Structures are given as structure tokens and as C-alpha cells.
Image: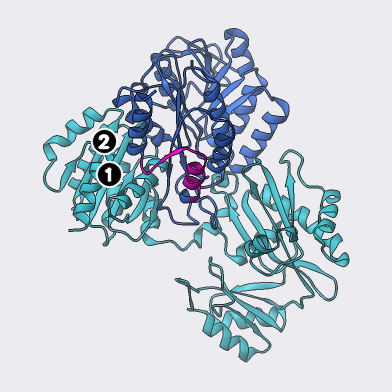
Chain colours: A blue, B cyan
């Protein structure tokens, strides 16, 4: 099984008529994802290579029955687009946009929690989600993933997500679902959401977790793992050599004072019984060893 | 983007937060002019974006023109932890009865805003937090609700601020919250927030960090950006649209994606090398961006080897390869280049590079192999 999405998930693309939206929307469709519509205000009634375009999310949902939306819009419009998706009846929203103001993210997150408790937001600033062979929403290249499980992947970093998929696929180890939660300060979905879903998914037998410096999500995940997780977890945390006080590309990746260091995160995870590895390759090798021994 | 104290105070003023009358001075003569305008005694404060100014001799009280000449002359040009003082803030010295602490920032774990208020100000708040956490009154604020005066009044009482300061402090905190939200701050901090013997509350310092993602709705931030003193390598990189942070090692790093770039630094370190920089060329980088990245690293005299670590997603590896070839044709790259290329169009990318490979331009199949090779070059 997969988590959050599957082969029946119907997806619309907000921003399908833009350059990025078109490229990735069509790529996702080519992968086999059920991309059933696009939304661009003022372009309703047109189509992108046969995918119908609507003026609003509500119209698109009414016409197609979509439950998921892939939001590909510039930072200044992203917060409104995410809210429009929730108001239009979408229950799973993937936001890949990088550079959304932190205050906008905090407002959107809290509006979703308070007004749309059944809606899950993945991202912003994430690569998306892929359940190999079933559904790919986002910017991950489908050919580096391998269907059939048994590993679930959850990652805060885009390219390290690809690296993790690659390390496993090359060794013939498949994935149930790979979720990129993104590196921004207010992620809609966090490690614990994904770990809990993987723990509940019978086909996922082990989980690979990729963290990075900044915040305390990895430490909180470690506490959750210690209390609830029965499946083996392999973790890698990027940024051991990152200097304090400098944002390392991601808005969330910053060490403030003594908090948020890779060392502290790795120690917390190790203490929770997680197999903590020093680089992505080592993490891949460790996971291969665990899966072969299952 | 961190603001200088004087910029933070100017920013506070826009939101009606009271600060001491003062002005900036880049010369002793300007310092004298400001002192005459605001009235003696004055405090002369070094404008550097680093803590510990007072201990380093960067903050002095002056009661006369002669003292302004002496202190301003001494502080201008002073080196404080590697930051050379080029500008002063001169303000009328306040009599202080009490020092408090106030700040707003994002509470990341709880995804709401966090106000911190303490009657023990004037010292490092981290020290207070360690030694006497109960002395800080934390207030979680729902971004959809905000902070009203009634809540602020309860908060200042809970924090134990003196009776005579409470009413003004509550109003000031509401303004500071407005500055934090409408001003798109990552951090708005006042330490100390003071009560004067004659019963006035105002901000004696200002520490403001702006969220650069919000710059599209703040054209007024351009003036802050103009005064940013940057590492020349970082300035050049920013002009070319690259996400670059200068470090002290010998292996130049180019990677796509922040996570992979951080991981590349780690791996170089693990195999015995040191990174000269963090450089994320971002998603969807083309040949021009790649060429610019190589040129920026080539300017760094400490670099002895360059490690290009690309996992194509949005970024296409063939574009990266074209960029490498283009950079080599435009400028002489002083250091050998080791590449590791995977992901979208990796086969095409490797084919483009193939005819150009030699003992100073090589590819390795994995991240670890490439790191070892680059470090071997750097440590020759």
C-alpha cells in the first residue's frame, strides 16, 4: 500500500498553463498519475494537451471529482492558491513553491487547521510525493523510484530525497511511498505524520528518514519513534559541518545558538533506536542490509 | 536579512514604537552634529551586526564634545570580532530605572507566533532562559487572532514588569507585534526595553531580522540591502543569482539543492577535506548558472579542487555539463574539477563531457568516490 495517495487519486494542477506547471503536470501524467484538470483564472474552457482547464478549483472539483491538487504558482500567490484548494473541496494539497514568506505560511497553516481539519498540506517548498508505479505528484523524476516496497521514505530535502531513492532503487529495493516534506519553517506535513502513516501501512516494512539542520522536527520525531514505532528506521541528517547562524539554502535550515545542530538530532535519533548513518550512501547500504534480513 | 541597530530603530519608529532621539554618523564631525542636536549626555554605539559590542569597547557614554571626539574617533575603525566599524549611532543617553526584554519570533514546533517577555532584561536572554526559565513569560499567539491590548496587559503583569511600566509596555508590545507581522520580521527583539526614572517606556536597542522571502511586498527594504556588508565572494554570487556561503576550506563545492549541498560538505569533511563554500545552484539551473558558479569558485584563492555534485531533478544534467564546458572556454579554471552526475539526463550529460575529460576534469560514479578524489587533489 501507499500513504496519502494511490493509483486512484485524481489530481488537478493549479497553474497548469504556466511553464513549470505544464512541464511537471504533463510529466506526472506521463508517469500514470490521474491528472484530471488544471486551474488558471481566466483560462477556463481551454486545455493543455487534452487536460481541461477551469477558472476555479471549485469548478474543477465539481467537474472531475478530484481530491488532490498540485499547486505550482509563484510565492506571492501561493498562500491564496492553497486556501482556494481547501475551500474548493481538495483534501490533499502539494505545494512545491520555494520562497513563500514565513508569515504567509503560518497564516495558511493555522487556517487549514482551524477551518479545514480534514485537509492535508504537503510542503511548501517540497519535491512532492511519489508512490512508485501508482502516483507521482510533484517534481521527482519517476524513473529513479522502484515500485513494490517495502521501504517508506520521508525527507526534508529535495535532492537528498532523489539520492535516497537512487541508493535504494540501484540495489533493487523498492519503495511504498516517498514523501518530501520540504525545508521551510512551517511545513504542512511533518515527520511524525509520515512516520505514523508508514507505521500503519502493512506493506511498509522499514522507513528511511532524511533530516537536516534547523528546528526541532527531528528531535520530536525521535520521541515519537521511541514511543510508537515498531518498524526499523534508518536516518541521515545533513549539515554536520554547517556553520551556526547561516541559512543553508532552505529557510528552515539554520542553527540558532546550540539548538538545531545535526549532532543533537543524530544523538536524539540514535537514542530512540534509529540506525543513524553518516552519509546518504551509508544510509542506503544500511537499509539494504535491513531489508535483506526481513 | 539582519538589520543594523539604527535601521532596526528606524523600522520600529515606522510602527510607532518609541526609541531615543538620535542619528547616524560616519565621521567624528557628524557625531558632534548629532550630539549637539539630541543633547548631552549621548551614547555612541558601533553599528556592527555582531553581539558583544559593549565588551569590545564599541559602546561609550559621552558628556562633552571632547568625549564625543575621543570615543567616536576610537570606535570608528574598531575591529569587533572581524567586523570593522564604519558607522555610529549617536543617541541621547537615557536614565534607566529598569531593564526588560521583549521579542517576537516564530514558534516552529507549534506553528504559531511566540512572544517572550521578561523583567530581567539587558543581559543575554539565552542566559536567563538557562538559569531562570521562569523569569521569561512566553505567550503563544495564533497568527489568525493576533495580539490585542487586553491580552498584552495580562502578559506584562504575568511577566512581573513594574506597575508603572505596564500600561505603556502593553501598548508598545502590540506595536512591536504589528511591526513583526506587517513588517515581515523573522525576529523583532528589544533588549533592553527600559523604564526611565520619570516613568517612560521605550526601546533602547533593536534587533530585527527580515524575512527576505517577503521582499516582493517591501520595496522600502532596498535601502537596508544597500548597506549590507558582504564577503566579496558572496556578493559576486548573489549578483549571479547563486545561493553561496563562503567558508574557510580548500574544496570548492557546487551542488543542486540545499540538502545535497549540505550533505556534500559533510562527505568532504568525512573523507578528510574541508569545504571552501556552500553553493546551491538551485532547481532548474541551466548552463549559464553552472558556468557562473564555476567562475565564482574560481575567484577564491584558497580553492585547490572543485567538486561538482549534481543529482538532476528539475535540473538537467546535460545543461550542467554544457555549463562546465562553457565555463572552461570562457575562463581558465585554476583548480581540477571532479564531477558526480546522476538523475535527469545524466547519460546525455556524461556524453557531452566525455571528449573533454582529462587529468584535471574527471567524473566519478558516486558521491563518496568523487569526494575522495577531490580531497586528494586539494591535499596534494
Dividing the picture into quadrants, the one containing residue A210 is top left
Residue B373: x and y, percent?
A: 20, 47
Nearer to the camera, B223 or A155: A155
Callout 2 and callout 1 share a chain: yes
Query: Can residue B333 be seen here?
Result: no
Pointers 2 and 1 in contact (C-beta within 8 Å): yes
> Does A203 appear above or below B10?
above
Q: Residue furthest front?
A: A293
Nearer to the camera, B283 or B260: B260
- The image's mark for residue B50 is none
Dividing the picture into quadrants, the one containing residue A147 is top left
Is residue A278 located in the magenta-colored stretch of the structure? yes
Secondary element type, mark 2: strand
- The image's mark for residue B308 is 1
Q: How many marks?
A: 2
Residue drawn at (59%, 8%), measured in percent from left and top?
Answer: A63
Query: Can residue A60 be seen here?
Result: yes
Secondary element type, mark 1: strand
Residue A283: x and y, percent?
A: 37, 36
> Does B289 appear above or below A191?
below
Chain letter for the residue marked with disc 1 in the picture: B
| Mark before the other along the chain sequence, 2 or 1 | 1
Q: Which residue lies furthest to the bottom in this view?
A: B66
Is residue A192 located in the magenta-colored stretch of the structure? no
Tell me the magenta residue range.
A264-279
Residue B269: x and y, percent?
A: 32, 52
Chain letter for the residue marked with disc 2 in the picture: B
Q: How crowded is mark 2: few (under 14 residues within 10 Å), some or many (20 or more)?
A: many
Q: Mark 2 points at which residue?
A: B341
How far separated are the C-alphas under marks 2 and 1? Answer: 8 Å
Amino acid at each position: 500500500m501507499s500513504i496519502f495517495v494511490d493509483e486512484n487519486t485524481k489530481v488537478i494542477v493549479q497553474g497548469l498553463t504556466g511553464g513549470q506547471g505544464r512541464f511537471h503536470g504533463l510529466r506526472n501524467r506521463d508517469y500514470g498519475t490521474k491528472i484530471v484538470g488544471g486551474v488558471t483564472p481566466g483560462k477556463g474552457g481551454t486545455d493543455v494537451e487534452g487536460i481541461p482547464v477551469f477558472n476555479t478549483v471549485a469548478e474543477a472539483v465539481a467537474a472531475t471529482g478530484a481530491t488532490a491538487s498540485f499547486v505550482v504558482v509563484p510565492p506571492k500567490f501561493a498562500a491564496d492558491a492553497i486556501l482556494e484548494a481547501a475551500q474548493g473541496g481538495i483534501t490533499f494539497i502539494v505545494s512545491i513553491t520555494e520562497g513563500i514568506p514565513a508569515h504567509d505560511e503560518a497564516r495558511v497553516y493555522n487556517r487549514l487547521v482551524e477551518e479545514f481539519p480534514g485537509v492535508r498540506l504537503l510542503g511548501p517548498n517540497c519535491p512532492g510525493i511519489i508512490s512508485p508505479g501508482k502516483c507521482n505528484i510533484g517534481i521527482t523524476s519517476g524513473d529513479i523510484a522502484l515500485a513494490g516496497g517495502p521501504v517508506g521514505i520521508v525527507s526534508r530535502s529535495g535532492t537528498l530525497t532523489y539520492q535516497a531513492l537512487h541508493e535504494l532503487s540501484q540495489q533493487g529495493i523498492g519503495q511504498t511511498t516517498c514523501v518530501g516534506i520540504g525545508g521551510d519553517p512551517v511545513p504542512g506535513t511533518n515527520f511524525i505524520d509520515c512516520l505514523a502513516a508508514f507505521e500503519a501501512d502493512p506493506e511498509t516494512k522499514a522507513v528511511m528518514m532524511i533530516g537536516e539542520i534547523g528546528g526541532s522536527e527531528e528531535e520530536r520525531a525521535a520521541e515519537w519513534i521511541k514511543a510508537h514505532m515498531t518498524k526499523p528506521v534508518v536516518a541521515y541528517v545533513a549539515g554536520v559541518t554547517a556553520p551556526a547562524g547561516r541559512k543553508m539554502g532552505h529557510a528552515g535550515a539554520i542553527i540558532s545558538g546550540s539548538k538545531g545542530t545535526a549532532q543533537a538530532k543524530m544523538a536524539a535519533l540514535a537514542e530512540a533506536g534509529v540506525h543513524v548513518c553518516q552519509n546518504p550512501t551509508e544510509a542506503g547500504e544500511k537499509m539494504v542490509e535491513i531489508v535483506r534480513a526481513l | 536579512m539582519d538589520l543594523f541597530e539604527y535601521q532596526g530603530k528606524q523600522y520600529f519608529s515606522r510602527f510607532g514604537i518609541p526609541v531615543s532621539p538620535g542619528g547616524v554618523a560616519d565621521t567624528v564631525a557628524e557625531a558632534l552634529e548629532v550630539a549637539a542636536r539630541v543633547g548631552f549626555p549621548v551614547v555612541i554605539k558601533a553599528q556592527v551586526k555582531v553581539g558583544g559590542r559593549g565588551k569590545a569597547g564599541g559602546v561609550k557614554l559621552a558628556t562633552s564634545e571632547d568625549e564625543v571626539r575621543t570615543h567616536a574617533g576610537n570606535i570608528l575603525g574598531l575591529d569587533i570580532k572581524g567586523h570593522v566599524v564604519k558607522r555610529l549611532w549617536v543617541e541621547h543617553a537615557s536614565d534607566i530605572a529598569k531593564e526588560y526584554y521583549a521579542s517576537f519570533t516564530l514558534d516552529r514546533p507549534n506553528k504559531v507566533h511566540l512572544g517572550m517577555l521578561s523583567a530581567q532584561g539587558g543581559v543575554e536572554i539565552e542566559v536567563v532562559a538557562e538559569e531562570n526559565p521562569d523569569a521569561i513569560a512566553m505567550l503563544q499567539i495564533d497568527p489568525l487572532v493576533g495580539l490585542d491590548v487586553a491580552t498584552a496587559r495580562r502578559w506584562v503583569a504575568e511577566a512581573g514588569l513594574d506597575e508603572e511600566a505596564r500600561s505603556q509596555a502593553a501598548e508598545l508590545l502590540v506595536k512591536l507585534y504589528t511591526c513583526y507581522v506587517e513588517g515581515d520580521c523573522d525576529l523583532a527583539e528589544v533588549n533592553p526595553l527600559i523604564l526611565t526614572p520619570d516613568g517612560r517606556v521605550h526601546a533602547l536597542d533593536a534587533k530585527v531580522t527580515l524575512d527576505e522571502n517577503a521582499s516582493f511586498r517591501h520595496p522600502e527594504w532596498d535601502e537596508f540591502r544597500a548597506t549590507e556588508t558582504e564577503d566579496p565572494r558572496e556578493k559576486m554570487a548573489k549578483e549571479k543569482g547563486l545561493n553561496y556561503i563562503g567558508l574557510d576550506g580548500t574544496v570548492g563545492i557546487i551542488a543542486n539543492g540545499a540538502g545535497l549541498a549540505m550533505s556534500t560538505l559533510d562527505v568532504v569533511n568525512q573523507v578528510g577535506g574541508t569545504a571552501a563554500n556552500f553553493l546551491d545552484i538551485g532547481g532548474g539551473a541551466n548552463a549559464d548558472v553552472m558556468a557562473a558558479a564555476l567562475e565564482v569558485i574560481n575567484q577564491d584563492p584558497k580553492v585547490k579542487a572543485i567538486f561538482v555534485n549534481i543529482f538532476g531533478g528539475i535540473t538537467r544534467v546535460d545543461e550542467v555539463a554544457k555549463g562546465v564546458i562553457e565555463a572552461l572556454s570562457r575562463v581558465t579554471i585554476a583548480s581540477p574539477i571532479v564531477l558526480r552526475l546522476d538523475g535527469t539526463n545524466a547519460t546525455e550529460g556524461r556524453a557531452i563531457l566525455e571528449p573533454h575529460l582529462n587529468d584535471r576534469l574527471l567524473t566519478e560514479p558516486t558521491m563518496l568516490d568523487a569526494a575522495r578524489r577531490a580531497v586528494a587533489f586539494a591535499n596534494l
